[in-house]
Amino acid sequence: MSSGPVICFGQQPCGFFPRRFLVAKIQTARRLQAELGGEIVFFYHDSDHDPRETQTILRHRATREPATLNFAFANKVQRKFSPLYLKRIPADWPGKTALQLPNYVERPAIVAFQRVTAATVADFCLEMYHAQGLLDGIRVARSGEIAFRRAACDITDFFVDVPYQDELVRARFADGQLRLHEGGDQYLTLPTTFFTKDQISPTRDSRLRWMQSVLHCTHYIAGAGERAYLHPEDAPEITFVNRDAIDDAHEAWTQFPG
């Protein structure tokens, strides 16, 4: 554990080129570090399963019209229910996507994209963020890692990674049942099965306390959406800091070295 400030920000994988609000969090964390010292930790919540999180919004270089690109997924079960750290990318997706990129980004971004060899969505995003230099000097802690889960505190509000149709899916545990949300008010109840901490990840409401039990951060950079559901009373020792403003926050950041 660091003896100085631990400046943290959290985010799901948020596009194969990251959304600009993630860059704003990183910039805010670096500004705080310059003022206070200490280390920066990126809580990479790759246990999330929502495929919409990785939508990548790019603007056409000629018309400036926005386009939304996203990963393809190995199958429908993975797309809907598997955590992002387990969603597999079809072998032909990188090549097909690379053919579209000249319409939207400069050559350094295309070259970096073509160099990524990661087979899962979360790994692909993280490799790209590193290639952009965004995470230089920043420690990454992943919610999908077994060691992180084992070190975390017990929570009563959580998801469980369990088998379903030859895949691992992220099922909500509530009232003694494991359920998959199929949309609207429709849920699929899975058979009850034994599970351990290795399979557990938090819900939105329990995420802060679960994360803090491992990272022990002193400062947390919060996005605009996060402030609406964070429970500061779960971690009164944290100083919460709003991320710096940035234009076009939900669009992709496509700057690369070189």
Image (cartoon, grey):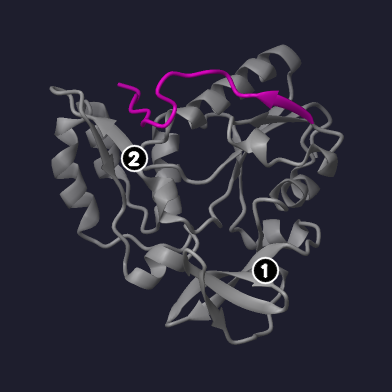
Amino acid type indicated by mark 1 = Asp
Residue at point 36%, 45% (across, down): 55
Nearer the observer, 107 or 211: 211
- SS majority, magenta: loop
The quadrant where residue 69 appears: top left
- Category of crowding for the residue at label 2, using alpha-carbon neighbours closer than 10 angstroms: few (below 14), some (14–19), many (at least 20): many
Q: Position of residue 192 (x, y in %)?
A: 64, 86
**Is 108 drawn above or below residue 41 in the view shown?**
above
Residue 40, numbered label: none
Q: Nearer the viewer, mark 2 or mark 1?
A: 2
Name the residue carrying label 1. Answer: 198
Please state if 60 lies on the left or on the right of 5 as rendered. left
Tell me where the magenta segment starts and ends, as one range: 239-258
Q: Position of residue 95 (x, y in %)?
A: 18, 50
- Category of crowding for the residue at label 1, using alpha-carbon neighbours closer than 10 angstroms: few (below 14), some (14–19), many (at least 20): some
**Can residue 41 be seen here?**
no
Please state if 137 lies on the left or on the right of 215 as rendered. left
251 in magenta: yes
Please, what secondary structure does the residue beneath circle 2 have?
A: strand
**Can residue 121 be seen here?**
yes
Please state if 123 lies on the left or on the right of 177 as rendered. left
Q: Position of residue 128 (x, y in %)?
A: 39, 39
Name the residue carrying label 2. Answer: 56
Marks 2 and 1, how far apart at CA: 30 Å
Tell me the quarter of the image containing the C terminus. top left
Please, what secondary structure does the residue beneath circle 1 have?
A: helix
14 in magenta: no
Q: Could you tell which of marks 2 and 1 lies nearer the N-terminus? A: 2
Amino acid type indicated by mark 2 = Thr
